[in-house]
Image: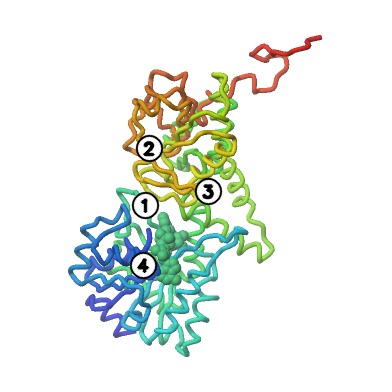
């Protein structure tokens, strides 16, 4: 412990990061910037080759940062796990997706741990950063590592420290986002705290790995449930003829007890749609049903069909059907100003519309190509002339580069799922906005006495 402590204090430690994706690469760059030598290990040959050339494939990590780290000898990208033999710390940042049956797939964590066990040596610190269910670190990682014959807490140290990075966030990054650490033993927590304090502004120790795992799941389950609640509120507002965004913004003026969340076309990314299922799965094994998680997943999961219905309603106004209509999707990444399409609701919306016979195209300045089913689609230019050729455009992701005024001016029909058109004054009749109360005619409130539109029938008695 002492020698590792000294190496961390004088920055002579070598740190390994396993998995160089959205989480691992920014982390590796932050550790290198603090003066440590970092070994970055990934199974993806293309990523390793790109990094070796000093290039970046993550928008939030500038090319120059990678180039400087590689050329300055501070960062060594490799596919070779045997380099772990020379590393003092190992951070695991591999994916934790869901299996086809929507159960946790922790195979990436397990295979990384097997590799670490082969090269485990006294004084090493192992930290799991991948989001996972409570118990993964002490029930799976520690027993596998102790198969080496070394003992956790005395020979080597293990902690869980959830990654909280928010891709595309211009204010918060790895460096200034507070970091939670929970070790297997108090000594493990202390050494992990020391490691992160070297390159992260604020480190918060908690009492156990299980607590640290649960912190991450609370954060993301909180988001999933609040988004589910506000998506349901948007549907209510549509029926009530109230603009949900006006309601939320007014409620957000309350200086305590309220946090604004906004509706949208569904959940996306590698975290919010997935992580709560890790918690629900673990609890199911303990005979406990996580009901809020299930309900939020149900409501969030139906939002793509709500969008398809909005499109159908809009086209119906001008006597068109989805079948045969030309529909352009604006923004396919799962959120604003990022290029990540994992779990993006755009994929579900496009599948639904395609199944109904729509002729689809898409534009996303950050996603030049998109795989949908067996097809590789190419982003087309969203010029006014191109937009005008479409029967409908759907704003699924409101990237900052979109000129919404020009889009609305050129379009025949705009389905807005992100409140992107909030400042548009003219052409309101061609905009259908989620949660604005303008998508459902008042006759949808079923009151036989007060139907607003005359019923057109053949064969009136
Ligand atoms: N993306 C986010 O915004 C975010 C935020 C917080 C937490 N997380 C969590 O962090 C973890 C990583 O997510 P990500 O978005 O960085 O994933 P990612 O897919 O972008 O990156 C993971 C990398 O790990 C590599 N990899 C897979 N198995 C490996 C192995 N056995 N050895 C070495 N490399 C391996 C992959 O090739 C890939 O490059 C997940 O648990 C995720 O839930 C993600």
Q: CA distance from mark 4 to mark 2?
A: 30 Å
The residue labelled by disc 2 is: 380
Q: Nearer the viewer, residue 272 or 200?
A: 272
Q: Is residue 436 above or below residue 203?
A: above
Camera-side residue: 353 or 63? 353
Question: Between tags 4 and 1, which lies in front?
Answer: 4
Work out which quarter of the rendered image holds the N terminus and state it. Answer: bottom left
Asked which secondary structure carries label 3, the reply is loop
Instruction: Say which mark, if any, is on residue 45.
Output: 4
Dot 1: what SS?
Answer: loop
Give how far across and how far down residue 399 sits, in percent.
36, 39
Report the side of 197 relative to 305 (left or right): left
Q: Which residue is mark 1?
A: 167
**Any mark on residue 379, and which?**
none
Q: Which residue is mark 3?
A: 373
Mark before the other along the chain sequence, 4 or 1: 4
Q: Residue furthest right?
A: 461
> What is the residue that sits farthest to the top in this orientation?
461
Q: CA distance from mark 4 to mark 3?
A: 25 Å
Dot 4, crowdedness within 10 Å: few (<14), some or many (≥20)? few
| Quarter location, residue 14 | bottom left
User: What whole-number distance in Å separates the C-alpha atoms at marks 2 and 3?
Assistant: 19 Å
Q: Give the alpha-carbon distance from disc 4 to disc 1, as whole Å.
A: 23 Å
């Amino acid at each position: 412990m002492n020698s590792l402590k000294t190496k961390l204090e004088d920055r002579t430690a070598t740190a390994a990061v396993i998995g160089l994706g959205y989480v691992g690469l920014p982390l590796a760059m932050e550790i290198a910037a603090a003066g440590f030598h970092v070994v970055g290990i990934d199974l993806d040959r293309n990523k390793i080759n790109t990094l070796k050339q000093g290039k970046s494939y993550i928008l939030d990590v500038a090319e120059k940062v990678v180039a400087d780290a590689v050329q300055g000898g501070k960062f060594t990208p490799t596919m070779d796990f045997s380099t772990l033999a020379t590393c003092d710390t190992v951070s695991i940042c591999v994916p934790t997706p869901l299996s086809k049956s929507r159960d946790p797939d922790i195979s990436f964590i397990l295979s990384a741990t097997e590799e670490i066990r082969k090269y485990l040596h006294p004084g090493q610190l192992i930290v799991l950063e991948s989001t996972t269910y409570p118990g993964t670190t002490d029930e799976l990682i520690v027993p596998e590592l102790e198969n080496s014959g070394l003992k956790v807490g005395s020979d080597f140290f293990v902690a869980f420290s959830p990654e909280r990075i928010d891709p595309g966030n211009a204010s918060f990054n790895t460096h200034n986002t507070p970091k939670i650490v929970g070790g297997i033993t108090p000594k493990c927590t202390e050494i992990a705290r020391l490691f992160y304090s070297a390159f992260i502004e604020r480190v918060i120790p908690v009492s156990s790995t299980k607590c640290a795992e649960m912190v991450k799941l609370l954060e993301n389950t909180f988001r999933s449930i609040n988004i589910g609640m506000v998506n349901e509120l948007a549907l209510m507002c549509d029926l009530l003829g109230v603009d949900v965004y006006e309601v939320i913004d007014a409620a957000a003026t309350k200086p305590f007890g309220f946090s604004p969340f906004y509706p949208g076309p569904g959940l996306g990314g590698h975290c919010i749609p997935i992580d709560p299922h890790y918690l629900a799965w673990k609890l199911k094994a303990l005979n406990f049903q996580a009901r809020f998680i299930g309900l939020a997943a149900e409501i969030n999961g139906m939002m793509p069909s709500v969008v398809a219905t909005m499109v159908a309603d809009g086209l119906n106004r001008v006597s068109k059907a989805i079948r045969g209509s030309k529909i352009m999707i604006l923004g396919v990444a799962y959120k604003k100003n990022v290029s990540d399409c994992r779990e993006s609701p755009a994929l579900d919306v496009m599948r639904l519309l395609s199944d109904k016979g729509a002729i689809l195209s898409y534009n996303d300045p950050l996603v030049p190509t998109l795989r949908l089913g067996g097809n590789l689609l190419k982003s087309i230019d969203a010029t006014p002339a191109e937009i005008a050729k479409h029967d409908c455009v759907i704003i699924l992701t409101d990237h900052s580069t979109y000129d919404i005024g020009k889009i609305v001016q050129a379009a025949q029909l705009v389905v807005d799922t992100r409140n992107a058109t909030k400042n548009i004054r003219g052409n309101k009749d061609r905009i259908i906005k989620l949660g604005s109360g303008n998508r459902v005619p008042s006759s949808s409130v079923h009151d036989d006495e007060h139907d607003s539109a005359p019923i057109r029938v053949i064969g009136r008695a």
